[in-house]
Image: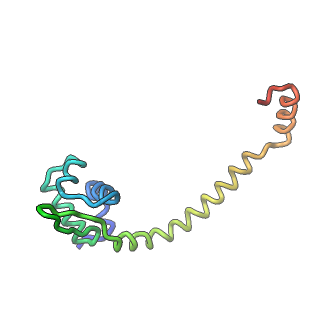
Amino acid sequence: MESVFEVIAEPNRRAILSLLAGSQQSVGEIERSLRMPQPAVSKHLRVLRDAGFVESTVDAQRRLYRLKPGPFQEFDEWLAQFRRFWSAHIDALERHLEKMDEPTPRKKIVKNAKAKKGEGK
């Protein structure tokens, strides 16, 4: 069985997952949305189902596919370590940008002079 990362590495599978994130879909709806042949859609759905990403239900003559949360939770837990890393860097960037936005003494003098002349608007 493929790992979670191998499963989502395939671009067509990611496209299918993106479609299913909006709502459950039939094979035919996925086919039309992604302009993929039915056998290819079915093959990717089988891989996604076997990996636990999707499940299906039967509605009359069609099979509807929807996302299952399990593998996404596993992936989210793995990503958490990187979120902490990026969060610290983004906070540092925000502080740096705030400092850059603060006017320097020279900028304050020029800005005040322009404001007195009516040019600073």
Q: x%, y% of residue 108?
A: 84, 39
Q: Is residue 89 left or right of residue 112?
A: left
Q: Report how many numbered discs are placed on residues in the image.
A: 0
Q: Is residue 38 left or right of residue 15?
A: left
Task: Give the color scheme: rainbow, by chain, secondary structure or one colour.
Answer: rainbow
Q: x%, y% of residue 13?
A: 27, 58
Q: x%, y% of residue 2?
A: 25, 70
The structure residue drawn at horizontal position 21% and vertical position 53%, both measured from the top left corner, is: 29
| Quarter placement of the N terminus | bottom left
Q: Which of the two residues, 87 or 73, is positioned nearer the viewer here?
A: 73
Image vertical order of residue 103 relative to residue 67, above or below: above
The structure residue drawn at horizontal position 20% and vertical position 68%, both measured from the top left corner, is: 57
The structure residue drawn at horizontal position 66% and vertical position 54%, both measured from the top left corner, is: 94
Q: Quadrant of residue 54?
A: bottom left
| Quarter placement of the C terminus | top right
Residue found farthest to the front: 60
The structure residue drawn at horizontal position 64% and vertical position 60%, both measured from the top left corner, is: 91
Q: Quadrant of residue 103?
A: top right
Q: x%, y% of residue 62?
A: 14, 61
Image vertical order of residue 24 relative to residue 33, above or below: below
